[in-house]
Amino acid sequence: MTMNLGFLALSIVKIVAILAYLYGLLWVMGHSNKIVKVAGILLAFGIVQAALLVEFGETRVLNDFDRGLLFQACTMTMVALGLNLIYGFNGQFSLAQWGFYGIGAYTAADITYRWTNGDARGLLVAGLGVALGGLMILGVGRLIKRYKGMPVLSQFTLYLIGSAAAGGVAVLIGNAINTGLAPLFGTVEAPGILASSVVLQIVFFLAVLIAGAFAAEVSFLFGLPVLTLGSDYFGIASLGFSIVIQTLMVNTDTLLPFPEMKGGRGMIGIPKLTSWFWAFLFLIAIIIIMRNLIYSSTGRAIMSVREDETAAKAMGIDVANYKLLAFVIGSLFAGIGGGVYAHYIGFLSPGTFDFLVGFNPLIIIVFGGLGSMTGTIAASFGWIFFLEGLLRVLLGQMGTEAPTWRYVLYPIALLLLMLLRPQGLLGNVEWGFLKRPVIKLRGDAAPAVPASK
């Protein structure tokens, strides 16, 4: 019991310190002085980096277990922020977020896995496919605008045909370029320039971005016809999508041409490239993008759809377009989070992306507060460090089956929250950088003083 109490006390101190750290980070990000802002962000990065490296005797401030929880919290924050954009700010109940998280994880992992094995096709085909797919979406979109009133299913068919064509071209070009790049990888005894660690870091960065973009383009194709359904029906359809994606993961080596993913056995050999630098960089980037989007005119249009679709239409807002935009951007965040996660854990199993686990980000945004960016960030870190960290360890000391009781405590806690504080733990409270910007209105202009003659 002494060990339990000691671990409990230390864990609570760490959780409080993390929440204080998040508050300080968001405060300094919102500082009006740019020098203070940049210096504060660098200091925030350095504090955690030091905590991961500095040792006191034989222990570190943040040990390997804490390091794993930290990376999980960062990726969960990315996924949850995306879901909050879709559901909390846009009002579209979605259960597909975990599927896009898995798409991003497997896409990024396949790119770097192939690269470390002397095969550039993963990067080339995926990169070209995403680029050509984006150009195709823009081109078909312009074509559709010329023919107003085209049925949604007809639009979807055009996009689907264009996607297949873009993918086919990407495969042909990627295979051709890969043949020329193969000698630059060298051999095990004499590695080439493309096998260097610096190049691998660049490939990892590109892989995460490509994974996010691919998840976004898949969400565009899925959301185009399905978002026309009502919110409840869309939720059911999104659940079906997650189940389909998880089934495809189980059969990547049979139905899909990716034997390296090993289907239900799980993908191994993924290079562990995620560091605190990369996790911090992608997390800060997503927070900045999310905040600037929400407080822009586009963000106000997105939120107007949540408040009243009829009123939004009456004001000239393209409701279908803003639903799709929020869904695509939210899926982009999930795909990036998946890419970061895959290279932290080094192993991907289809069971990780089971639709039941996919309820986690939904629970997080409800805990933190729908429509609250700060609540989502704080709840994501609290969820991982308290429920997945502290609670799992304490229950594990009570018996091998005890940790499964977490899945009993989660719904009980959620039920109590809905009864006692339905707006979430933080409600509409935002910290620092995430506060609504204050718009300074012009004062009454002073009357002009006539010039003396």
Image (cartoon, rainbow, N blue to C red):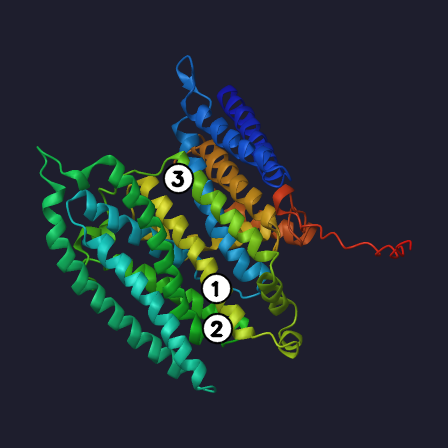
Residue depicted at 14% across the width and 49% down the height: 181
Residue 1: % across, % down: 51, 22
Q: Which residue is disc 2 drawn over?
A: 227
For the C terminus, give its image quadrant.
bottom right
Q: Of residues 377 and 367, which is closer to you in this image?
A: 377
Q: Of residues 41 and 24, which is closer to you in this image?
A: 41
Circles 1 and 2: CB distance less than 8 Å? yes
Residue found at the far right of this picture: 453
Corner quadrant of residue 431:
top right
Residue 377: % across, % down: 55, 45
Residue found at the far top of this picture: 57
Q: Which residue is disc 3 drawn over?
A: 278
Mark 1, secondary structure of its residue: helix
The three-letter code of the residue at mark 3 reads: Trp
Q: CA distance from mark 1 to mark 3?
A: 25 Å
Q: Which mark is residue 373?
A: none
Report the number of numbered marks. 3
Q: Which residue is disc 1 drawn over?
A: 327
Q: Is residue 91 left or right of residue 49?
A: right
Residue 219: % across, % down: 40, 65
The three-letter code of the residue at mark 1 reads: Phe
Q: In this rendering, which labeled residue sits more in front, label 1 or label 3?
A: 3
Q: In this rendering, is residue 371 above or below 170?
A: above
